[in-house]
Amino acid sequence: MAVPLPVLEYCLPQQWQLILLLVLLPLIFLLAKSWSRKGRRLHLPPGPPRLPILGNLHQMGALPHRSLRDLARRHGPVVLLRLGAVPTVVVSSAEAAREVMKTHDADCCSRPDTPGPRRLSYEHKDVAFSPYSDYWREMRKLFVVELLSMRRVQATGYAREAQVDKLIGRLTSAGQKPVFLEDHIFALMDGVIGTVAFGNIYGTEQFAHKKHFHDVVDEAVSAKASFSAEDYFPNALGCLVDRLTGVVSRRERVFRDLDDFFETIIEQHLDHSRATPERGPDLIDVFVALMTEHQGSPSFTKDHIKGLLSNVFTASVDTSSVTMVWAMAELIRKPAVLKKVQEEIRAVVGNKERVQPDDVPQLKYLKMVVKETLRLHPAVPLLLPRETLRDVKISGYDVPARTRLLVNAWAIGRDPCSWGDSPEEFDPDRFEGKDVDFNGTHFELVPFGAGRRMCPGMAMGVATVEFTLANLLYCFDWALPEGMAAEDVSTEEAGGLTVRKKMPLVLVPTRYKWHQR
């Protein structure tokens, strides 16, 4: 039974009454605030029923972007799931994506702090996986200016041209025999990014162990994408499961291998006897200069350089390569489209040995082919997860702070509301006269995201994809191996952080004799 205040006057001295009130008032305020929130009924997004403990994890499937699209068809474009212990909202429409990445971008622009990305990014010293902070803003600015700005993209054109020349040479030497196109394209992308980041030493004898590094990068990408119990059960139970299943030991092994490689490269750049790069400082030279300027200060260290380099390789090489393979697969399945884009390129280029950088802006239909490829096959179909910083409303639903957000770019690119009656069909002509681009302003096409977390590597990635595809289509006529028909080319996907063709793309290149036209 409550004690009336008059009784307190007789039971307690006056100074103790004052102390008691000072203690009780904040407690009463907190309780009232808590009761107010509980009393305010949240209008949460709809979602499927959940299992105990697992929540909706069992519904994610091997290809989550497809499973989540199916859930969106049943429950609507904004779906609430509980993945283990983590509340997660999935958006699958252009309108909902606009609210997440534009209207409420400032409130939805952080990243969840999960163990795998944290470790492999040197405690979030990177750009892609780092939670939103002043540090992230500074690092992103540095990353864009030194590697990914349009000025830098144009300045590194020499790397693209050199690697495309090597690609053309390798395919020509195949002598009209079937080739695994993916291997050649991955080699090209590795060369482009490696040269831009490491300078002229990339590809020399100092990189004799490069093949091992490729394996490490593949492992790092796989480790970031693979299931970790601690991502969904951020407690002692999740940590224990990851240790028992080998997730933690695998992560540590990948981290050590990456760290050894990055340490070697940074030390080479610190060597004062190293020859001056022919084309000026490479990316690591710039980072090393920043580190030496701040020597003795924790503001920029070797770990910062390594964290940024982990983004360069685990993101850039894979995503652009996957896009080019999908483009060639779709073109070989549509001979009429393949013929149309080749005729455009050959008409523009004329009688030159290969496509030149100045030719690319004139290739309007090729750009439509790239857009259509990114619409159907975004390299990262579920954009990297976001986390809300504050309570927001998405499509009229309440989304509390610290909720994980997934944008299903794959589902948005195939939404009939945006793309008509045949959204699953590869048809570049759908962009004819349509002002839709992937630059973060048209939310029906968001392969690179939008807002503060938009992929900073978009300009360099697109420049490389367009220039490489233009040369593949100009320099070679393409056919399937004997006995295969266009309809035999599979579009089945293999899951991971990026989604690639499950079956390798095998094609027969025949050198185009431009001088005999």
Image (cartoon, helix red, strand yellow):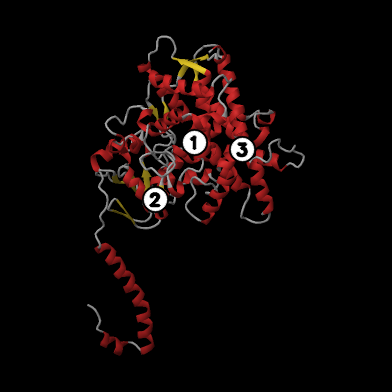
Please state if 272 lies on the left or on the right of 330 as rendered: right
- Residue at 52% x, 56% y is 134
User: For this rendering, which residue is in front, 479 or 226?
Assistant: 479
Residue 282 found in image quarter: top right
What residue would you read off at disc 3?
155
Which badge, 2 or 1, comes first in the chain's sequence?
A: 2
Please state if 40 lies on the left or on the right of 301 as rendered: left
What residue would you read off at disc 1?
221
Disc 1 crowd rating (10 Å Cα; few below 14, some 14-19, many 20+) is: many
Cα separation between marks 2 and 1:
28 Å
Spot occupied by residue 327 in the image (x, y as percentages of width and height): 44, 26
User: Which disc number belongs to residue 102?
Assistant: 2
Residue 424 found in image quarter: top left
Cα separation between marks 2 and 3:
31 Å
Q: Specify the farthest residue to the left.
A: 1
Is residue 159 depicted above or below 255 in this figure?
Answer: above
- Residue at 49% x, 19% y is 180
Amino acid type indicated by mark 3: Ala
Amino acid type indicated by mark 2: Lys
